[in-house]
Image (cartoon, helix red, strand yellow):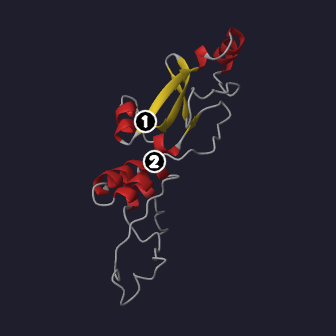
């Protein structure tokens, strides 16, 4: 009988990683010896982002700098690598489903968003090309006025392609 291949959906937790502290405190005799660490992959696991932000929220009162660092890392700008049709999503937003209130979620983490429709940013010939090909690869969204904006996504809506721009909330 051949062994059943292991799949992520059915395996659950198993010892996939070996984690050691750089300061050696997890070694025998250290004050963290025997600690049980948990690894999250924020690049390829979309569920890592809400888990990290929940942790940042949970530790904010006692460890405000750690909380701020986690939030900053989650929402750090990324290199935009669009697919052949021009779509792309920042890893912090890959897990979000339709109907989720992104603005409220971002505001809770000190961020703000602005959205830009391709229809407001191109001429009629470019729109006709999109209608024929369903590709928005030719569209290069321009950031909103002001500092600190980074592209969070280029995604499809009922009204055509839309770009989401995000930044740390401006001081009022």
Residue 54 against residue 2 in the figure, above or below: above
Residue 104's label in the rendered image is none
Q: How many residues crowd mark 2 within 10 Å: few (<14), some (14–19), many (20+)?
A: some
Is residue 94 in view? no
The percent position of residue 107, horizontal first and vertical second, equals: 37, 36
Q: Give the number of the mark in front: 1 or 2.
A: 1
Residue at left offset 34%, top offset 40%:
108
Mark 2 element type:
loop
> Where in the figure is residue 46, as x and y percent of width and height?
45, 47
Q: CA distance from mark 1 to mark 2?
A: 30 Å
Residue, disc 2: 46
The residue indicated by pointer 1 is: 171
- Expressed as whole percent of the image width and height from the top left, the position of residue 81 reads 65, 41
| Residue 157: percent from left, percent from top | 50, 22
Residue at horizontal 36%, vertical 28%? Answer: 99
In the displayed structure image, the side of residue 83 where residue 100 appears, left or right: left
Residue drawn at x 45%, y 82% as measured from the top left = 24
If the image is split into quadrants, where does the C terminus sit? top left
Q: Residue furthest front?
A: 172
């Amino acid at each position: 009988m051949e062994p059943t291949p292991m799949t992520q959906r059915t395996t659950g937790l198993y010892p996939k990683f070996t984690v050691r502290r750089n300061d050696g405190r997890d070694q025998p005799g250290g004050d963290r010896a025997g600690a049980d660490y948990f690894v999250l992959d924020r690049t390829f696991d979309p569920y890592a982002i809400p888990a990290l932000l929940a942790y940042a929220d949970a530790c904010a009162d006692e460890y405000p700098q750690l909380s701020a660092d986690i939030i900053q890392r989650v929402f750090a700008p990324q290199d935009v690598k669009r697919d052949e049709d021009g779509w792309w999503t920042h890893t912090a937003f890959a897990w979000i489903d339709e109907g989720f209130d992104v603005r409220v979620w971002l505001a809770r983490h000190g961020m703000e968003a602005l959205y830009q429709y391709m229809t407001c940013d191109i001429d009629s010939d470019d729109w006709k090309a999109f209608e024929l090909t369903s590709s928005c690869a030719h569209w290069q969204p321009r950031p909103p006025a002001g500092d600190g904006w980074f592209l969070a996504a280029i995604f499809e809506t009922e009204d055509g392609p839309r770009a989401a721009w995000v930044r740390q909330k401006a001081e009022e």
